[in-house]
Image: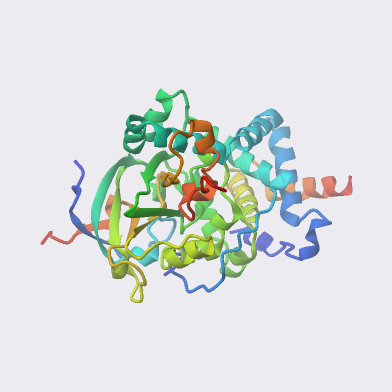
Amino acid sequence: MSNEQQVNHGDHDSESEIQPSYYASRAKAIEALLVQKGVMTTNEINSEVNAMDSKSPADGAKIVALAWLDDSFKTKLLANASEALEEIGYKLPDETPYLKVVENSEDIHHVVVCTLCSCYPRMLLGRPPDWYKSLAYRSRVVVSPREVMEEFGLRLSDDIEVRVLDSTADLRYMVIPRRPLGTDGFDQESLAALVTRDSMIGVSDPLSAHF
Amino acid sequence: MDRFNIGDSVAVRIDSPRGHYRTPIYIQGKTGIIESICGRFKNPERLAYGYDGYPLKTLYTVEFLQKDLWPDYKGNIADKLLIDIYEHWLNSINEG
Amino acid sequence: MRGVHDRGGLPDDTPINREEHELMDWERRVDAMHAVLGSKGLRSTDQMRRVIESIPKDEYEQMTYYERWAFALETLVTENELLSTAEIDKKMAELMSE
């Protein structure tokens, strides 16, 4: 492939932040040309940047909080996530992969990875964190999920069944973590404040109600 | 018709065809159980080369016991790994 | 044979580095250009994956995430003949001399 040689031009020096990196310059040139040739407009690129910037784990947290409060919503969410979300007025973007929601309980704990690349429920949680895309996470969490979760501060008892979800195809997974104890009477907003991004990936529990 | 039903035992094909495919090597040759039928999707092996992805392939979530995947697995013997695999990568282990 | 991208179960003792970096502008824009090309039917996710999987192992392991995406972007737009490598070289030289 003619482009292979370009891989070797990459500048991996830690000093590269001062100079724009090879790939940053390359990407700028590609953007300028794609716009110049009318393949896409700057506006189209900007609005895509903004669309992704506007997605954050806060969206997922609100949905988890609602699932904790409303059993019938939770049942629908687990059965057909995009339909359940549409019913509450949350429309997932067109052309996105299928979203599948799973629930942690006192007996079963789910944790999500994509060992082949970085599949992630971006339509709901935004761009994945760096560690999710790291080679270490991708290689280790399938074979040593309990050890990896301990690094995130989550020590699971041996009698909990761990289910690792390797999302390698057309489904994207989001976890409903266990609702923290001592949150009876909390409303959606105060519950959502306890739901962290990492708890929706499954590497940690939500925040405690008494922090 | 989908070739497999929920609960069927299946073995993942061992193969490394040239080109792009979505079946990691750690799961190849392993035996698991159909956990759910996800639907029919465009074939990534065709999409990767700019084709339209047809014919569609049924995608299954297949459940494996971790102890069957890793010889030294530490954890609950019921710990599982679930992964989505396209139909043409699965063989029935009950078929003759 | 294990592909360079196929990481599951590879022996690895590295602790998970939970430090996160603020995305740089070019990284956001590479991400967006992939999405825009996709919405116009000029690129599929599996095409991008196929290109990323073709990166030699040493390079794959050294490159940052969005460097891989930038490499895939260039490969796909040149493959589709939307742009040529020579054009990109020229434009890059122009932009750098500004």
Q: Quadrant of the N terminus of chain C?
A: bottom left
State the colouring used for the structure image.
rainbow
- Give how far across and how far down residue A147 sits, in percent: 46, 67
Q: Residue furthest right?
A: C98
Q: Quadrant of the C terminus of chain C?
A: top right
Does A123 sit above or below residue A130?
Answer: above
Residue A48 at x, y percent in the picture: 62, 34
Residue B83 seen by the camera: no
Compared with A161, A171 (above or below) is above
Closer to us: A190 or A100: A190
Say which residue appears at 44% left-offset and 32% top-offset: A66
Numbered label tally: 0
Give residue A59's position: percent from left, percent from top: 53, 35
In the image, farthest residue toward the left: B96
Question: Measured from the top left, where is residue B87 in percent x and y?
Answer: 27, 51
Q: Which of the pair B35/A29 is nearer the observer?
A: B35
Q: Nearer the viewer, residue A102 or B81?
A: A102
Query: Residue B33 vs residue A93: left or right?
Result: left
Residue at 84% from the left image edge and 46% from the top image edge: C94
Find the residue positioned furthest to the bottom: B72
In the displayed structure image, the side of residue B31 where residue A117 appears, left or right? right
To which quarter of the image does residue A69 belong? top left
Could you tell me if residue A162 is visible in this image?
A: yes
Residue at 31% x, 36% y: name it.
A79
- Residue at x 70%, y 49% (from the top left corner): C22
Quadrant in which residue C8 is drawn: bottom left
